[in-house]
Image (spheres, rainbow, N blue to C red):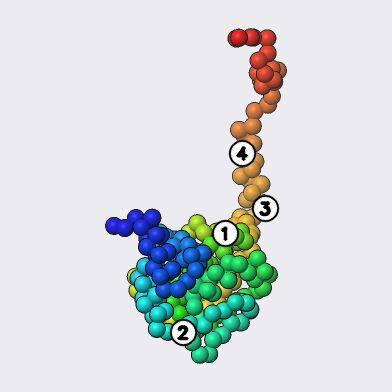
Amino acid sequence: MKTLSEIDTTSKRATKAVGFSWGIAEEVGKNMKLLELFGLSGIKNLNKYLQDYKKKQFEKITLINEINESKKNPFCPIILGTNFIDQVNLMDKKKNIKIHNLAFPVLFLPFVSRASEVIGKRIFLKLDDKEFLFNLNQSIYSNYLKNEILENSRSISIDFIENTNSFSEAEWNEIYKLSEDTFVEESDSLKMGAAGAGLTDND
């Protein structure tokens, strides 16, 4: 079995070899580690994408709007992902982002996962009929577990989820009251012990 370090290094070098900058190649290396760690088909999709990159023209998006559509060539997932992270602090003020016609969308997913950590919010993404919930780059919940190559997605929808508690104020008050049973009142002896060396000098 290949180590995460091998996956990172080889992915980075292969990405650089087809014409990307070292900076972007570094990002791809990190992403492949994430995908493989989360059980998604990173290397399989990257390998096919890099083979196609040599002979196909993919659309490069710079400014991401609420609706992004390429009617001719599909968007490059790596350039899209790089700009998504760079612009996510502005985008999370929008209610929803839509992207139409994206090549190899699996390669875009780790960028979204990392963006979730950047803004400190969960992100919900729907890729055609496949759903993904990104949790601050700590985990990815999904109804998609197939180890396959996805060459194109016609429709991607991205929602930024506001941070809220999963419990009510009443439930919090109840559990907090239980926690109070562990509080210890300060006695004179505790105060003296916490003040320093006291009257005992061990030097």
Q: Nearer the viewer, residue 96 or 149?
A: 149
The residue tagged with tag 3: helix, strand or loop?
helix
Going from the N terminus, do you reach mark 1 or mark 3 first?
1
Mark 2 and mark 4 residues within 8 Å of each other at the beta carbon: no
> Nearer the observer, disc 2 or disc 4?
2
Q: Position of residue 97 (x, y in %)?
A: 60, 76
**Side of 36 relative to 169 (left or right):** left
Q: How many marks?
A: 4
Q: Dot 2: few (<14), some (14–19), or many (≥20) neighbours within 10 Å?
A: few
The three-letter amino acid code for the residue at tag 1 is Glu
Q: Dot 1: few (<14), some (14–19), or many (≥20) neighbours within 10 Å?
A: some
Q: Which labelled disc corresponds to residue 179? A: 4
Q: Dot 3: few (<14), some (14–19), or many (≥20) neighbours within 10 Å?
A: few
Distance CA(mark 2)–CA(mark 4): 61 Å
Residue, x 42% and y 79% (percent of image)?
A: 53
> Nearer the observer, disc 2 or disc 1?
2
Q: Nearer the viewer, residue 59 or 22?
A: 22
**Where does label 2 land, which residue?**
57
The three-letter amino acid code for the residue at tag 2 is Gln
Going from the N terminus, do you reach mark 4 or mark 3 first?
3
**Side of 20 relative to 164 (left or right):** left
The residue tagged with tag 4: helix, strand or loop?
helix
Residue, x 37% and y 62% (percent of image)?
A: 10
The three-letter amino acid code for the residue at tag 3 is Glu
Mark 4 and mark 3 residues within 8 Å of each other at the beta carbon: no
**Where does label 3 land, which residue?**
169
Mark 1 and mark 3 residues within 8 Å of each other at the beta carbon: no
Distance CA(mark 1)–CA(mark 4): 30 Å
**Where does label 1 land, which residue?**
117
